[in-house]
Amino acid sequence: MITFIKLIIIGFISGVILAAAGKLIRMVTGNKAEILLYNMDYMPVIKKWSDKWITGIIFHYTTCIVSAAVLFYMLIPFGWELNIWPYVLVYTAGSAALYFLSLLTDKPPAANSFSSWFYWTFSHAIFGFAVGYLIKWWV
């Protein structure tokens, strides 16, 4: 149970790091890729609540927490749960593919924007490193 609570905290902290990376990228470059962190337009069931700012934030942190815990437990059979690089690789590759959910919304960024795709993917590599590092250090 202690490990699970630590994973919840790690997911939350890493979510803060991901949000900060997205915000920093937006401040420096003006690129709006970070909007996807909070966008739920492509999810039919919860889309009806997407007009409220708090639901996007809850969506972001829930996703970060759940993904950190689930990946940790998925890596246990391979003995990789305390290695940093599986987290970096899975979150980087996964986010690179999931970026194209932007095709299903009219909000920015555009699905064909290479720079947005790159910033989105890069910020998730940072997220993966944060998750992996915190798990290696703390779990």
Image: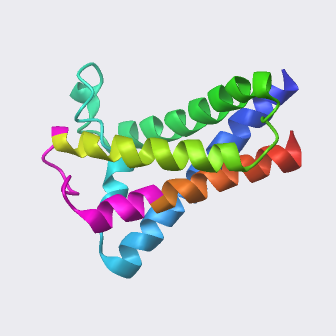
Q: Quadrant of residue 110?
A: bottom left
Q: Which residues are magenta?
A: 104-121
Q: Residue furthest left?
A: 106
**Side (left or right) of 58 relative to 85:** left
**Side (left or right) of 76 relative to 11:** right
Rendered view: 100 above or below 59 = below
Q: Tell me the residue at 43%/46% (across/down).
A: 95
Q: Quadrant of the N terminus?
A: top right
Magenta-span inclusion, residue 108:
yes
Rendered view: 90 above or below 3 = below
Quick one: 94 or 47, which is closer to the camera? 94
Q: Quadrant of the C terminus?
A: top right
Q: Quadrant of residue 45?
A: top left
Magenta-span inclusion, residue 107:
yes
Whole-percent x, y for residue 60 in the image:
46, 41
**Side (left or right) of 92 relative to 103:** right
Whole-percent x, y for residue 109 in the image:
23, 57
Q: Residue furthest front?
A: 78
Quick one: 2 or 104, which is closer to the camera? 104
